[in-house]
Amino acid sequence: MDAMVHVEGVGKRFGQVQAVRDLSFSVRRGEVVGFIGPNGAGKTTTIRLISAVLRPDAGSIKVNGFDVRTDGDQVRASIGVLTEGAGLYPNLSGLDNLRFFAELYGVDDPRRPEALLGAMGLAAHAHRRAGTYSTGMKKRLGLARALIHRPPVLLLDESTAGLDPEGITMVLKEVRRLSREEGVTVVLCSHILHQLEMVCDTYVIVDAGRSLAQGTLAELVRDYVRQRVVELETDLSLERAHEIAARFHARLVAPSGASRSKLSFTVDRPDDVPEIIAAASSAGRVYSAVRVGEDLQSVYFRVMEARASEA
Amino acid sequence: MRRKGIDRRAVAAIARKDIRAITSNVQVWLPMAIVPTIFCLVLPVILGIAIRTGGIDDGSDIGPMLALIERMPHSSLKQALDSLEDLNQRMVYLMFNHLFAPLFLIVPIMAASTVATDSFVGEKERGTFESLLLAPIDLMSMFMGKVMAAFIPAVTLSLASFVVYGIAANIAGWSVIGRPFFPHVNWLPLMALVMPAVALLAVAITVLISARTSSFQAAYQMSALLVIPLVMLMIGQVTGVMLLDTASFTLIGIIIAIVDWILIRLIVSRLDRSRMFESQVK
Ligand SMILES: Nc1ncnc2c1ncn2[C@@H]1O[C@H](COP(=O)(O)OP(=O)(O)OP(=O)(O)O)[C@@H](O)[C@H]1O
Ligand SMILES: [Mg+2]
């Protein structure tokens, strides 16, 4: 077992609210997991359970081989967390914030705080009070704080909310680099699904504290997207298009008029998609072929629909 | 489950961080500085002026004071007073050395509770408590760092105030007594024992208060109640109901230290990360 984070049958209740129930998932070393679900689904609570600041009512959690119940300090030493509010001292400068956390985490390299500040593009603001930072700068400083002790596991809660496009790219690149080059295991919570798609290997979709679906995007598509849609930009005549559609029992949607247009074919069998593309290109010119409804966002809505129809 | 014990590096880091936060925040150091300034400078200066303009020797307020001295049991203070020639000298000596002694304890109380409030409630208000609890530091070390952060500045400020007050008192009373007369030996147990014990008590009580409030306003208001026992002590001193000699100050110091120990044991036994996180992190 190479699981860096192992969650099994975990439950957590706050008074009347069952924030997490019977949740299980496992994250391999170096894997990047997208943890997604609607507001109040229990994502932040799960992150707090994993980082051993909340005790689970039921189930077990292991991080880097340590049990959250018995080895809390080792678990916390193995984890870097970027919390929703970045959790920085407003009256201390950016650099002093990092120096403080370096001491807390027992970091011995005295250059680490400055180096990280530079890596996060904050070198010019090192001596400004963190309270005067912009939202995005705070997030970057928070990320630097989370990374200060080179943790093997990184938990990011809404880490790109409030960031500008450059900040988002920077964070996502850094996440990818950490996972690929340093083998860091990452759990990412976000509501911006297309961003997750750029970095995540697998996903865990939760709602009301329960896991609804888990797997790679391909696996989720296989399990939740019944009909496949391919959109072709082509110069095919409508007649030929209808012919092809009929051959594969596909539903065809075509705008009337334009000679070079977007045709959308909907089929039940995934294997028919390449066949349709092949047939279209032998009958005419295909400028582009895009599969529609197989992105994370569409899959997410499918999973939510499936849950709603079960209930 | 007790393992490695106290993490000295973390204790020092937390204490240093909080102490730096005080010096960089006017809202914290200003109230801390005002009380000692009034006590150590304004009070002696006013009294000094009163003495010079002769407001003290023929006033009608002397009656109760006199009675106070008359009723005094045999003690080093009484001896010191008896050795002084006239009533005026006794009055000045009594006021600076004796009557204001309990009032002086406002300095450590104010300082300790102000810093402790900022240190404990501040973590909650500024949303940094979560980051602190996420660190691989046992709660005992964290708590010790926080207590140090309030205790060290409070004791330092009190000692500095004591020196300034002493100088100011001697100058103010010089025209009447004609030699240095402060401090009386009572100040030894007061400064060495009662003052630190009271500072620690203020920290402990502030910790208990901050656990139940999440806004500075409420915490400060409740901490202000800490001054009530002092006022009572002061009234006791002035009316002569409670005349404190060196032994009483020592005893009071020991009693407060024991109360400190009990309160801190109580707080430490209740430290629980998960429960604290649930109730304190927004
Ligand atoms: N300390 C707490 N005390 C009481 N209830 C809590 C506490 N923390 C979380 N909850 C409740 O637990 C549920 C899950 O909350 P959680 O913050 O984990 O959701 P989330 O998935 O992170 O939501 P969001 O997307 O809005 O960040 C919510 O109903 C919330 O009100
Ligand atoms: Mg959340």
Image (spheres, grey):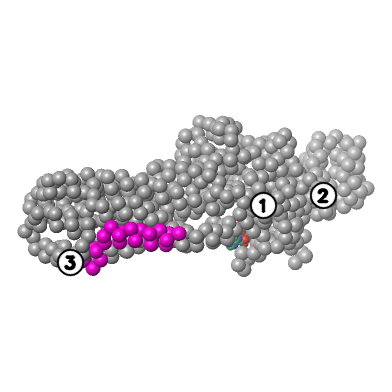
From the viewer's side, name the closer residue of B144 and A179.
B144
Q: Quadrant of the rendered structure where residue B65 is?
A: bottom left
Identified by mark 1, the residue type is: Asp
Residue at horizontal 47 percent and vertical 45 percent from the top: B15
The C terminus of chain A lies in quadrant = bottom right
Indicate the amino acid at tag 2. Answer: Glu
Chief SS of the magenta region: helix
What is the chain letter for disc 1?
A
Residue, x 25% and y 44% (percent of image)?
B164
Q: Which secondary structure, mark 2?
A: helix
Q: Position of residue A39 (x, y in %)?
A: 63, 57
Residue A96 screen position, x and y as percent: 49, 38
Residue B43 falls left or right of residue B205: left
The quarter of the rendering in which ligand 1 is drawn is: bottom right
- Tell me the distance, in whole angstroms, between the alpha carbons under discs 3 and 1: 64 Å
Q: CA distance from mark 1 to mark 2?
A: 35 Å
Mark 3 lies on a secondary structure that is: helix
- Magenta range: B237-261
Q: Do the CB atoms of the residues marked 3 and 1 lie less than 8 Å apart?
A: no
Instruction: Give the labeled residue for mark 3.
Output: B71
* Residue A33 is at least partly visible in this image: no
Does the stretch in magenta take in B133? no
The magenta stretch spans residue B260: yes
Task: Please name which of the two marks, 1 or 2, marks the residue nearer to the observer.
Answer: 1
* Kind of residue indicated by mark 3: Arg
Residue ID at (21%, 57%): B77
Q: Residue at x 45, y 49 (%)?
A: B148
Report the disc number at residue A219.
2
Task: Check disc 1 and report the residue beneath it.
Answer: A71
Q: Report the residue that reaches farthest toward the right.
A: A247
Crowd tier of the residue under label 2, counting other residues whose Cα lies within 10 Å: few below 14, some 14–19, many 20 or above: some
x then y, percent, for residue A90: 47, 44
